[in-house]
Amino acid sequence: MKAEQISIFLENRAGRLEEVTRVLAEAGISIRALSLADTSDFGILRLIVSDHEKAKVALKENGFTVGRNAVVAVEVSDKPGGLHAILSLLCSGGVNVEYMYAFVHQCERSAVIIFRFDRTDQAIELLQKNNITIIPGEKLYSI
């Protein structure tokens, strides 16, 4: 039920993000979701891609520092309180959200939130027990 996310550490300078997208495009990799956080010196680009192994190799071959993390993609009702219901459930189960980012299905009436938890397996168990839809990595990579 986990999905693979790659994290790329970028110097905070013009053109660096373009270099990442060029490498991925040349490798035939599609970006499914992304988050970019920065400081004055560097940024962390988090990506869900169509082929994380191929992306990691291509990026490393082009001089990027790349890490991998397990994340959980959760389907959240696209209505007021949808996200709150998920966060309340996790909070009551003692699971901390380290970070999250979202995207919306074009053909669905739901959003997909990508979560990084401090206790991923416990979060998955808690979500499943409460009938929360978790999107498997294989499906997420091809959305």
Image (spheres, rainbow, N blue to C red):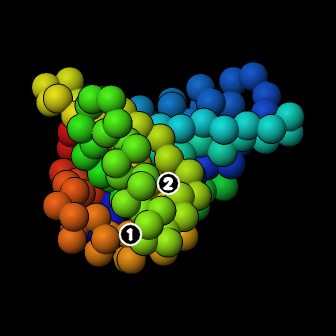
Q: CA distance from mark 1 to mark 2?
A: 20 Å
Quadrant assignment for the C terminus: top left
Q: Amino acid at mark 1?
A: Ala
From the viewer's perspective, is residue 117 above or below residue 27?
Answer: below
Q: Residue at x 66, y 55 (%)?
A: 65
Horizontal arrangement in the rendering, residue 21 relative to residue 143 (left or right): right
- Answer with the quarter of the image where residue 71 lies: bottom left
> Mark 2 — residue?
6
| Element marked by disc 2 | strand
Residue 35 x %, y %: 53, 38
Sequence-first tag of 1 and 2:
2
Residue 107 x %, y %: 13, 25
Numbered label attached to residue 123:
1
Horizontal arrangement in the rendering, residue 112 relative to residue 68 (left or right): left
Number of numbered labels in the structure image:
2
Horizontal arrangement in the rendering, residue 88 relative to residue 127 (left or right): right
